[in-house]
């Protein structure tokens, strides 16, 4: 998993509440076996018209936001079914961080496990970021995980809280497998000792 430390990027405003995972990545695109390639299908029903052409009224289709790496949206982001494909799709679309007043729990956890930083800020602050991004296309912020701050060229915007353990994992690019492999030597020693222990248990059982 790619580590996250600090990201400076264009803000894409998705001024909607209750954005659910079936909108982030519709169910018909969950058949892929890879973790990559989902970005082209992200927000599919909003991004495209029925004839397959881009919907010019959808915020993220505007040229100013196509290279955005920070998504700002309304409360309860990532609600709905629990699909890990949702953070995969956002990441593949180019987003490194998502800022919202609140997130659905499973989506929030899946973000940390896949290298996307979910940032919870007060709703008033989020609304201010949305307004700036709309009024000033190309508006950039810096999300600093180490300092736990969001700032722009004018200075600090807000600080945010993050669980220390999750912060450690994301700073070091550790998913569940990576975390386990940090204890590789101990696991190897245990496995080497296992046959002898099993023989001892067998002998004791016979006696």
Image (cartoon, helix red, strand yellow):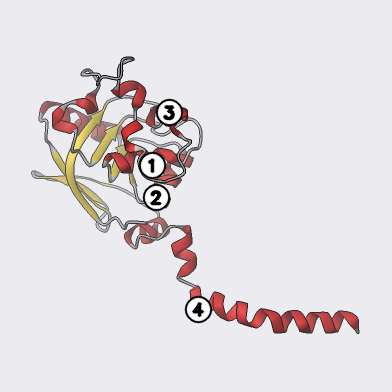
Check disc 4: other Cα within 10 Å, few if <14, some if 14-19, many if 20+.
few
Q: Pointer 2 and pointer 1: residues touching (CB < 8 Å)?
A: yes
Q: Residues within 10 Å of mark 3 (few under 14, many from 20)?
A: some
Q: Residue at x 42, y 51 (%)?
A: 113
- From mark 2 to mark 3, how far is it between C-alphas? 19 Å
The percent position of residue 8, horizontal first and vertical second, equals 17, 48
- Residue marked by disc 3: 26
Q: Quick check: 60 above or below 179?
A: above
Q: Secondary structure at mark 2?
A: loop
Q: Nearer the viewer, residue 41 or 91?
A: 41
Q: Which residue is mark 4?
A: 185
- Of labels 2 and 3, earlier in sequence is 3
> Which residue is the site of mark 2?
114
> Pointer 4 and pointer 3: residues touching (CB < 8 Å)?
no
Q: Which residue is mark 1?
A: 87
**Secondary structure at numbered mark 4:** helix
């Amino acid at each position: 998993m790619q580590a996250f430390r600090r990201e400076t990027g264009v803000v894409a405003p998705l001024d909607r509440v209750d954005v659910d995972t079936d909108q982030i990545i519709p169910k018909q695109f969950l058949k892929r076996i890879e973790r990559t390639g989902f970005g082209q299908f992200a927000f599919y029903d909003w991004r495209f018209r029925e004839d397959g052409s881009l919907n010019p009224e959808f915020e993220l289709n505007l040229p100013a936001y196509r290279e955005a790496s920070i998504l700002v949206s309304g409360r309860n982001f990532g609600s709905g079914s629990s699909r890990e494909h949702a953070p995969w799709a956002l990441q593949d679309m180019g987003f490194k961080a998502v800022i919202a007043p609140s997130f659905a729990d499973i989506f929030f956890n899946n973000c940390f496990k896949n290298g996307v930083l979910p940032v919870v800020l007060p709703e008033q602050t989020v609304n201010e970021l949305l307004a700036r991004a709309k009024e000033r296309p190309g508006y950039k912020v810096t999300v600093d995980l180490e300092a736990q701050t969001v700032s722009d060229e004018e200075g600090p915007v807000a600080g945010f809280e993050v669980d220390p353990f999750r912060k450690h994992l994301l700073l070091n690019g550790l998913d569940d497998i990576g975390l386990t492999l940090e204890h590789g030597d101990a696991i190897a020693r245990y496995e080497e000792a296992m046959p002898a222990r099993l023989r001892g248990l067998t002998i004791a059982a016979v006696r």
